[in-house]
Image (cartoon, rainbow, N blue to C red):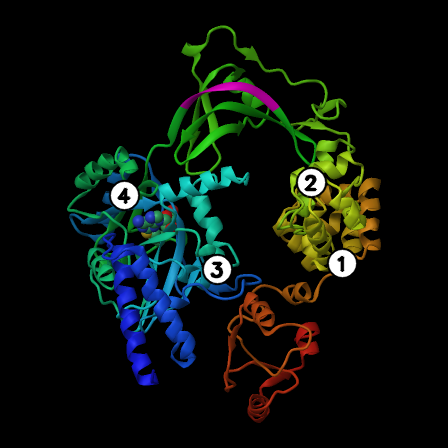
Amino acid sequence: MKIEEAKKKIEKLKGEIRHHDRKYYIDAVPEIPDSEYDKLLKELEVLEKEFPELLAPDSPSQRVGGEPLKEFKTVTHKIPMLSLDNCYSATELIAFDERIVKNLKENKAEYIVEPKIDGVAVNLFYDDGFLRSASTRGDGVRGDDITANIKTIRSIPLTIAFTGKLEVRGEVYLPREEFLRMNQEKEESGEAEFANPRNAAAGSLKLLDSREVARRPLSILLHTLGSVEQNIWKTHEAALFELEKLGLKTVQPIKLCKNILEVINYVNSWEHKRDTLSYEIDGMVVKVNFYEQHRILGSTNKSPRYALAYKFKARQALTALKKITLQVGRTGIITPVAELEPVFLSGSTISRCTLHNEDEIKRKDIREGDTVVIEKGGEVIPKVVNIVASRRTGKEKEFKMPATCPVCSSNIVRLNAEVAWRCQNVACSAQIEGKIDHFTGRTAMNLEGFGPAIIKQLIEKKLVKDYADLYSLKQEELAGLERMGEKSAVNLVKAVEGSKKNSLGKLLFALGISDVGEHTAEILASKFDNVDLVAEAGLENLQGIKGVGPRVAESVVNFFKQKGNISALNKLKKAGVNTEKTGEEKFLALGEGRFKGKTFVFTGELETMVREEAEVWVKKLGASVSSSVSKKTDYVVAGPGAGSKLEKAKFLGVKILTEKEFKENIK
Ligand code: IVH
C-alpha cells in the first residue's frame, strides 16, 4: 500500500472508531458488536505499525500509553478548582436564593439543578481540539497530572471540534455495577476490596501504570467550565448542551428551574430516586443559570456564591452488633471495634466499624447483642449512630474494658488527659506488628510485598524484633515462610535493598514517632540535615519550626529518649539506610514559591538525575520549564553536549548553572 492510500484509510478508520466510541460510551446505543469494533481498532493498529510516520498522538490506538510513570507531575490549575458549600434543608435553599436575588439586585433568579456525582474531580484541558492534559483537583490550586490515565477512559474524546483553549471539569466515576463486579473478583482472589465506588475510582486514577487503569471501566460526567478563552456561552444550560454536542459526556439529567420552589420540589423528588442512576450521587447541585450573574456573584476563596450542593440525608441501616473486640495499634492505643452482622449500605458491605473509645461506648450505651443504627455519611468510614432500645431483649452484654492488653496480657493504662487506653509494653507483638506494618507502608519506606501476614510470621518465627531487623533478613529465611515462593523472597530482599536510598522525610515518617505524619516528617526533613540533628534538636528548637506544635515537639523528644528506638536507628544506619537529607530535599528546602514566576531551561545531559526529575523539582518550587532560551529565561542548566541553547544563553547574559550548582548552591 502506498502512503497516501494508508493515510486515507487511517483517517477513515479513526473517524469510524470515534463515531462508535461516541455511540457506545456517550449515547449508550452501540451500533456494532464489540468484536467488530475490535476489528476496526486492530486494523488501525496494523496500519500504524506499518506506517509509523502516520501515527498521531490523538489516534484511538494511543489511549493506553507506554511505560508506567515514576510519579505524577504537579500542575497548577489556571483557575483554582473550588469546592461547593453544602446544605441539607429547604430552609437553607430559600436562604441561598434570597442572598442571590439580593446580590444580583433582581427579583428572581433561575437555576439549573443537576446530580452531585460521588466521584473524583478532574480537569480536562483541550487546546485547539486536542486533549492536551488532565489533572486531579489536588488541594484545589495544584493537582497531579494524570493525562495518561485519563486518556484510557473511552468516554473522553481525545479530539473535539473546538478551536482555542477549553478547560472542562467533571467527575470520574465507576458505575455501581462495575464496582460490585470488581469487588467480587477481588473477594475471589483474596485481595482487599474497595470500600465504595468513589474509592475505587480514586485508587484507579492514582495508578502509575496507565495500562492498569485501562482495565478499570471508569467513566466521566462533566459539569463545569474551567478557563475558556472567550465567553462563548451565556448560560450553564447552553454550555452543557454545546459540550455534549462536541462529544463530551455531561452531567445528566439536568433541570431548568424558574424559581427556588421548583428547585426544592425537584431535589426532593430525587431523594428517593437516586438508586435509579447507574452511579452514586450524594445530593443535587443548584447553580445559577446565567454566567454573567456568576461573575457578579463571584466566589469566596473556598466556594462559588452562585452554586450550592443540597446533600441527601446520610444513609442508615439496622444491624446486629454481635461482639465488641479490641484492636491494639502501633502506639499501643486500644480501640474497641464493633463486629457487625454484615449489611450492605451505599455501595459496600459493612461488617466492622470503630467504636472509637470507652467513653463513646458508655455515652451511647452500646452493648454486645444490641440492634444498632449505622450510618455512612459523606465520609467513607461508617459509624454507629445509636442503639435501638426497643429491640433489647435483656440478654445484651455491657462492655467492660479489660485490665490487660488483649494481645500481650500486660496491664493497660489510661493516661490523664487521654480518652484512650494504652498497652505500655513496647514488646507487645501487636505494637511491633503495627510499627513494622507502618514502616513498610507505601508512603513510608515502601517495602512492597511485606503485608501483615508476612510480618506476623516474621515476628512469630523470631526473625525480627523491630523494623530495623528487616534489613538483616536473608533470602533463605524469607523463602522459608508459609505461602512464599523463591521469586517473592527475591523481590522482598530487593525491596529492602532499594529502600536504603529513601529520603530523610520518608525515614522520619517510617520511624513511627507519635503525632509525626507524612507532612510533619517532610517539614522536619527540610529543617535538619540528618536524623541525628532531629534527635538532638531539643524541645525549644523544634517548637520554633513553623508547622511543628508543642505536642509534636514533645513526641519527637520522647521518641529519641527511648533506648529501643535508638538501637533500632543504629541498626538502620549500620545496614546502610540513608539518614541524610537527599539532593531533592535540600533543593525543596529552599522553600515553596522560591522560584515563583521564574523560567528554567535544561540543555545537554544531566549526569546524576533524569531531566523529568529536575523539572519536577523546579516546578515544585513554583518555576516553569521552557524548551527554548529567550530574554525571559532566568536560569539555564547546562550539561555535557549543550549546544546552541547554551550559546544563546551566554549571548543574552542569562544565568548559567552546572548540574552541581543547580543541585547544591543555586542562589
Ligand atoms: S460544580 C466550584 N457540579 O463536588 C465547584 N460539582 O463538593 C464547581 N461535584 O469539587 C463544582 N457533582 O468535584 C459541580 N454536578 C456537579 C458536581 C460537582 C459532583 C463535585 C465537584 C466539587 C465537589 C464539591
Q: Is residue 297 visible?
A: no
Q: Which mark is residue 210?
A: 3
Structural distance between the alpha carbons of marks 3 and 4: 42 Å
Q: Quadrant of residue 372?
A: top left
Relative to residue 599, is residue 393 depicted above or below? above
Q: Residue 445 vs residue 345: left or right? A: right
Q: Which mark is residue 578?
A: 1
Sooner in the amino-acid sequence: mark 1 or mark 4: 4
Structural distance between the alpha carbons of marks 3 and 2: 29 Å
Q: Amino acid at mark 1?
A: Asn
Quadrant of the drawing holding the C terminus: bottom right
**Label 3 Cα crowd, 10 Å radius (few <14 / some 14-19 / many 20+):** many
Q: Within 8 Å: ligand 1 and the Cβ of disc 2?
A: no
Question: Which secondary structure, mark 4?
Answer: helix
Sooner in the amino-acid sequence: mark 3 or mark 2: 3
Structural distance between the alpha carbons of marks 1 and 4: 55 Å
Q: Within 8 Å: ligand 1 and the Cβ of disc 3?
A: no
Q: Nearer the viewer, mark 1 or mark 3?
A: 3
Q: Residue 28 vs residue 217: left or right? A: left
Sooner in the amino-acid sequence: mark 1 or mark 3: 3
Which residue is labeled 2 in the image? 454
Q: Residue 336 vs residue 40: left or right? A: right
Question: Which secondary structure, mark 1?
Answer: loop
Q: Amino acid at mark 2?
A: Ile
Quadrant of the drawing holding the N terminus: bottom left
Most distant residue in the top direction: 394
| Mark 3 in CB contact with mark 2 (< 8 angstroms) | no
Depth check, front residue: 238 or 46: 46
